[in-house]
Amino acid sequence: MQRADAPVPGPREVHAASATARSARPFLRPAVAIPVAAALVVAIALADYSTGFEARIAILYLAPVSLATWAAGRHWGFAFAIVSALVWGIRILSPQAHTQGTHLYWDGAVLGVTLALFAEILSRLASALEHSDQRFVRVLEGIDAAVYVIDDEGAILYANRRLAALADDASPLTADAIAANFRAHDDRAHPPWRPGAWVDGTELAGRRGNRRYVVQARDIPWVDRPRAYLVVLTDVTDQRIAQELQIDHQEAMHRASRIMALTETTSAVAHELNQPLVAIVGYNAACLRLLEQGGDASEIRAAMERCRAQAVRAGDILKQLRELTRRRTPEFAPCDLNERVRNALAWTGHDLERAHVAVELDLAPGLPPVQADRVLIEQVVVNLVQNAIDAMRELPVADRHLRLQTSVDADGTQRVAVSDRGPGIPAGADERLYTSFFTTKADGLGLGLSICRSIVEMHGGRIGHESGRHGGASFHFTVPAGDR
Ligand code: ADP
């Protein structure tokens, strides 16, 4: 097998399939085959002579003619056909021969023509075979993947030039030498190539250039041995880079959307914090006044307790804000969905007020806790409420109505529904609603619903939507009952 970086071989050099079988057998090389064919002609002629030309063995001349044609081509085949016919014709001159006469000339001519025809057919067959080999090799040389075939001992039976470009030029091309050019893509050691060691789907990194390859390995029948192993190494570097970029991009967008949500909620928090702070200032002033006037201790104590309660409330608001902004892994804990819905309403209360949206709460009483991350569940409700607010901005104030409902399905799955009376889902958008970056809003990011879906599915639930009872859209999500 020639080194794979050689030019695409010509018809006589084809190094695949049957051509490999021929070149692999030394007696099929012209330098050996021609003398062997000549020796056969002599041996047949001697046998013919020693039997007094009585044994009908002319057919044996097919052997040297075939050998010469197959190993060295049509011209040598014709030459051996003529020589064989002439050698057979020696009997015409021999007094030993019993049969004489003109029909011997005919017999000789028929034998010569038959042998020549045979050489012609055989040479056409060989040429057709070589052309099909050549097509096969050209296809393998043309594809982007590195392809090679090895036998049980790891000897290379075929390798395309793409593979040669990957392998280290200094060492001879063997299965082990090829394997030495790769490492496991995640930096774990991998065994050198032995049949079966690189299973289908193994991902490797090249030692040079750090490109990534996926292995496909198959047992295949080979021309001159019971089996061989075909290994295809497909370069997947560009796909991997694209996948990694996409993941980075999605993470960045998720973070960006959280920051945006944070910006939105900051104004709500400022609004929420303002109330306890104003109250604290008021109670504090009242305490000071009572102290100056030598007021009753119980009155001062009551004012200070109210002051403390407001300070605790302000602290709680800040604590929730911190939880929302912290980059955190989900924390599954027993969680009351009704409480999460109320909390999400508190977060969006400022926006609801500003948009003059009336809220109807229809919460199922006595919901058992579900295992969920409460901050993430709140985020889902906040996103759905924000979308509902956006959907109703153009409606007359009297029609801006939002309904939040919790319920339990027959199998214990809990369900939260957020229904508005807006224009409903845009026509034809159903399929794409939950995919990233789908938005119909001028300033939308198209991430809200895709984040909701990720969060809900992370909890083992489902998110969906339908038309609301009073028009508009109704989005719902489920959280399965029981332990996770
Ligand atoms: P965006 O930030 O663009 O609103 P979302 O993923 O939250 O991103 O929403 C994607 C699209 O789904 C919206 O642009 C809108 O077309 C549609 N949509 C979401 N919620 C509603 C709703 N309550 N009513 C009508 N359309 C909605």
Image (tube, rainbow, N blue to C red):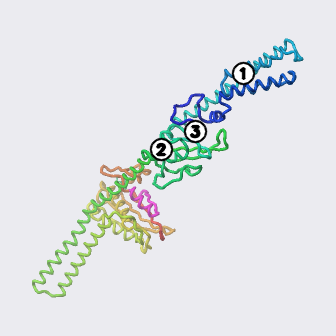
Give the foreground label among 2 and 1.
Answer: 1
Looking at the image, which residue is at 46% across and 49% down? 205
Indicate the amino acid at tag 3: Tyr
Circle 2: element type:
strand
Viewer-closest of 450 and 88: 88
Of labels 2 and 1, earlier in sequence is: 1
**Tag count:** 3
Q: Is residue 451 magenta?
A: yes
Q: Distance of mark 3 from mark 2, alpha carbons? A: 19 Å
Q: Residues within 10 Å of mark 2 (few under 14, many from 20)?
A: many
Viewer-closest of 45 and 299: 45
Q: Which residue is mark 3?
A: 158
Give the foreground label among 3 and 1.
Answer: 1
Q: Distance of mark 2 from mark 1, alpha carbons? A: 51 Å
Q: Quarter for ligand 1? A: bottom left
Q: Which residue is mark 2?
A: 235
Indicate the amino acid at tag 1: Phe
In the image, residue 389 lies at what x, y percent?
A: 32, 58
Looking at the image, which residue is at 20% across and 72% down? 277
State which quarter of the image contains the N terminus.
top right
Indicate the amino acid at tag 2: Asp
Looking at the image, which residue is at 43% across and 45% down? 208
Q: Is residue 456 above or below residue 182?
A: below
Disc 3: residue Cβ within 8 A of ligand 1's nearest atom: no
Of labels 3 and 1, earlier in sequence is: 1
Q: Which residue is mark 1?
A: 80
Of labels 3 and 2, earlier in sequence is: 3
